[in-house]
Image (cartoon, rainbow, N blue to C red):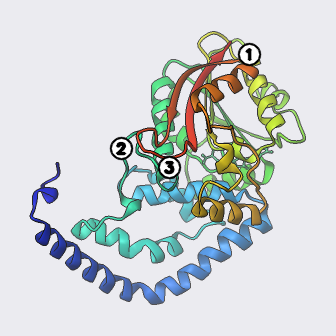
Amino acid sequence: MSDKKQLPIFIRFFIKLFQIILYISIQIIFIPFAIIGIIDAIYKEMRKSKKLGVSFSAIKALQYRWFMHYFNTRPDPISVAFTKNFPCESHFGMWSIMGPLIISQRLFGFTTRLGKLVEPGEETAGSTAGIRVLMFDKVMEKYVDEMEQIVLPGAGFDLMTLQFTKGKKVKVFELDQVNTLNVKVETLKKAGIEHDWITYIPVDYANESWVEKLLGAGFDKTKKTLFLWQSVSLYLEADIVKENLREMADLCVDGSIIAQDFYSKVFSSGEYSKAAKNFLSIIEKMGESSKFGIDMSDDPKAAVDSFLTECGLKMTKYIQFGEKLDIEPFYCIVEAEKL
Ligand SMILES: C[S@@+](CC[C@H](N)C(=O)[O-])C[C@H]1O[C@@H](n2cnc3c(N)ncnc32)[C@H](O)[C@@H]1O
């Protein structure tokens, strides 16, 4: 139990009250900056990204990594350096909006949901974004030294490979749609972030063969590979998800792993909660609709297992978010091998 929890309730109440008063004072000072910052952030995230044809869901994922860095839940200086040079996000805007919370947390321990991580099994839809990033980090840490190749299909603005594979012998391939990848590479160059050991492959799964492109870029079918498919299936049609997984399975040799996440059908349809519905409808307005989810209403583990079997895969690890809570299953992270 933390020291704070051992204090009598009225002292805890006064500490919280004092923190809120301090926080509000800082917030007031930030108001003029926040007004300019919000305008800059909305312009870059919504207008500029549309103009450049960049994935909005990938921008949101990058934004969360920025939060995690400043709220001390996952150090990520590469994502911060990237954001400062990224045309579709405003580093100043995010600071002007989040600054009071960041400062309050750092100066006097005033924490909000963004500054806390829940215990494994106690995740809710609202606390999933941060935990999922940490879990995929763990997958990467576990396999990076034993794999010969790593592939991120739908890498977006995830920069984890830069952090985990620098100086290692592993070959790394990242795939995503052409505009998103072009902006990613241009931003890396502008930010002076080294990335020359990574092969970036532009592809649209819906209209072209990513396998051909991957093989053409030097992927070796005889080598042990880790596929990391993080938060992509939600945005693809069911038949494309299946086809992609079958193709990944075909590229796996003994010891290769496919790590990925799945949302439930109820979540992807927007019926899970009002917050989820609002989030998905903003993403949809920006051009990416959520299309795929697995029916997790009965036995979620069995449902995911059977879906993977259909794709020629054997599930080797299953983590269900919110498992310890009395809530409807909505998300899981799984590892699989070729059947
Ligand atoms: C939510 S983002 C996740 C990005 C990254 N994996 C992460 O966790 O930060 C979804 C990604 O899937 C990519 N994507 C969606 N549909 C795609 C398609 N048809 N072909 C290629 N990439 C696609 C988007 O461009 C976007 O980068």
In whole angstroms, how far apart are the C-alphas of marks 2 and 3?
11 Å
What kind of element bears circle 3? helix
Kindly identify the residue that appears in the image at 76 percent across and 56 percent down.
Answer: 288
> Looking at numbered disc 1 in the image, what kind of residue is underneath it?
Lys
Give percent across and percent down for residue 186.
68, 55
Horizontal side, residue 300 vs residue 110: left or right: right
Residue 150, visible in the rendered structure: no
The C terminus lies in quadrant:
top right
Which quadrant of the view contains residue 175?
top right
Q: Residue at position x 28%, y 65% from top? A: 106
Q: Residues within 10 Å of mark 3 (few under 14, many from 20)?
A: some
Q: Amino acid at mark 2?
A: Glu
> Which residue was labeled with disc 2?
119
Q: Along the line of sight, which residue is nearer the eye, 338 or 215?
A: 338
Q: Mark 1 vs mark 2: which is more N-terminal? A: 2
Q: CA distance from mark 3 to mark 1?
A: 34 Å
Q: Position of residue 89 (x, y in %)?
A: 61, 67
Which circle marks residue 128 in the picture? 3
Task: Return the residue at label 1.
Answer: 221
The residue under label 3 is which amino acid type? Thr
Location of residue 304 (image quadrant): top right
Q: Residue at x 60, y 74 (%)?
A: 41
Please determine whether, in this image, residue 34 is positioned above or below residue 317: below
208 or 309, nearer to the observer: 309
